[in-house]
Image (spheres, rainbow, N blue to C red):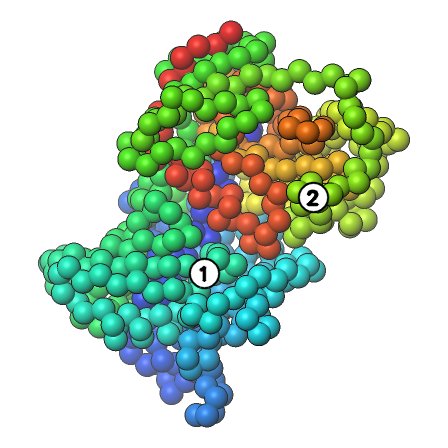
Amino acid sequence: MGPLISVRRFCILLLVLGAGFVRGESASPQVESEQWGIMLMQGKRVGFMNTMVTRRGDSQKPQWISDIHQQMKLKRLGMELLVTEHSRIVENDQGLVLNFEKKTQSAGMNSMVRGYRVGNELAMLSRGMEQRCPFPPETIGPRAFGQKMRAEMPLQAGSRWKSQAFMIVAPQAPAIVSMNVNQREPREVQGKKLDLWNATSEISVLPGLKVTVWMDADYQAVVSHMSFPGIGDIDQIMTTREEAMRELESAELFAPTLITPSKPLNNVSKLSKATFRLSTNGSQPLTIWSGGEQVVSNTAPGIAEVTVTVPHHDEAAATWVLPSQGGGDLDRYLQQTPYLEIKSQIIQELAHQAVGNEKNPLRAARKIEAFVRGYIRKKDLSVAFASAGETARSRQGDCTEHAVLAAALGRAVGLPTRIVNGIGYLPANYSGQATANNGLFGFHMWAEAWLGENQWVTMDAALNGFDVGHIAIAKIALQETNPMIDLTVPLLQAMEKLKIDVLSAE
C-alpha cells in the first residue's frame, strides 16, 4: 500500500500544541511548573501530554529544563500504533538554549536526536551523524518564552505580540511565534465553566497552520486547538494527572487523508498523460512542484492545473557512467544523511546486490527499483518513518520505507538520488483492497535518480512504478537531521480540503 501520512511526522507537529504555554503550581522545590493534558481526535482520547519545568544548578548559574512527554494511540487502516515522544530542552536563566534531545518510540522503531550549542552554532546529532547550523541568540527556550509572553502581552482584546522561539519540531529554523488576543469568553471545560481568553497563534516554521488557544488569567493554555488539513481537528485540554493517565482510545489517521477524484483513471498504467485541477478552500497559491514530467499551469489562489506525462528515457542517451563525480548542486544528492546511511555495511552490501557491475545510470535505477520492491517483504502501515538502514534490517514498511531505501542504495553506488513527497493514485480494487469506484489519491512518497542535466528517473518500488497518477508536491535531498518540517508542511498546505478533478487522460 503506497499512500500514507507518517505517524511520526504527525506526532512531531503536535508538540507545538503544548510547548511554551506552561505555568502551574510548584510540585516540589525543584519543580517550577507542571501541566498534564489530554489530546482529542474524532471525539476520542487518543493521547496525553505532560510538560514539566525544573531547575538545576546554583543561584549564580541556574539552568531550566523543560520536559515534554506525549503518547498517542492511532490507527492506519485499522492497524493500531502506539507512538511515544519525549523531548527535553535545557536553557539558562536568560533563555539561551544550551542543549536538547528528542526520543521517539513507535512500532519497534527507536530514534534519538540530540543537539547542543557551540558558540553561535547548533550542533545536532542523529544516527551517528553531526550537522551544524547558525543559532541566533534571540532564539529563546520554552520557559523564557512563557515568561516573556506574560511580561509583554497584555490579556486584552486586540493585543498583538510576537517573539522568536526555539521549537523542537524545527531546531535548525528559529521560529517566529505570533499571538493575537481576540476576546474573553466563557467556555465549559470538562464540566467546569471557565472564563478564558481566546487567542490565535501562527508559527513561521508551520506556515498556514493556526493554533487557537484558550488561556486563563495566568496565561495557562487550558484548551488548544489545531486543524490538520486532510486529517481533522485536534484538541488538547489541560487536566489532572489521573485523568490524563486513563486508558487511551485509537483514532483512524489514514482513511481521512484519502481523496476521491472526480472520475477514475482507467488503466492508469497504460496512460501516457493526464491533466488534473487541484483546488482547495484556501486563499493562498498552491505550492506544487513544476518541472520535468510535471507542469503546473493556470494557477489562482487555491487552484492549480497539473499535467503529468510519463517520461521515456533512452539508456543509450546516458552521458556518464557510475559512480557520479558530483560537483556543485549535485553533491547534496550523493551525501550520507541521518536517514540515508549509505556508508553502513548493510546498505553497501544491498546496493551491490541490486546493481552489480552496472555502470549505466538508467539501468542501475531500474535495478534498484525492482530490488527494493522484492526486498521489502512485509508491506504494511505498521512502521512510522524508518531510515534506510532500519528498513534494510527489518525488511518491512510502506512507501516511505521503499523510497528511502531506494534513494540510499542509489547513493551508495554513486547514483545521485532525491525524495519526492506527493500524492499517488490507487485504482478501484487495487490489489484486492476495497477503494472508491473512482479510485483514491493519498499521501505518497517515491524516489528519483539523476540521469543528466534536467533529467531524473522515478523509482517507485512501493507501487507498480511511475504512472500519471503521481502528483509531486516537493522534492528534497533529505539532508536535515530532523527533516519532518520539510517533509510535512508542503503536504499539509496542499491538502487543505483538497479536491482533484480529472480534466483529461490519454
The answer to which image quadrant residue 297 occupies is top left
Q: Nearer the viewer, residue 95 or 31?
A: 95
Q: Amino acid at mark 1?
A: Pro
Q: Nearer the viewer, mark 2 or mark 1?
A: 2
Left or right: where 356 falls relative to 433 = right
At 41% from the left edge and 59% from the top edge, which residue is drawn?
175
Q: Can I make out residue 287 in this image?
A: yes
The residue where tag 1 is placed is 174
Point out the image quarter for the N terminus: top right
At 34% from the left edge and 59% from the top edge, which residue is drawn?
177
Q: Amino acid at mark 2?
A: Gly
Label 2, residues with CA under 10 Å away: few <14, some 14-19, many ≥20: few
Q: Secondary structure at mark 1?
A: loop
**What's the CA distance linking mark 2 and mark 1?**
27 Å
* Residue 103 image offset from top left, x and y in percent: 55, 61
Q: Residue 328 bears which disc, if any?
A: 2
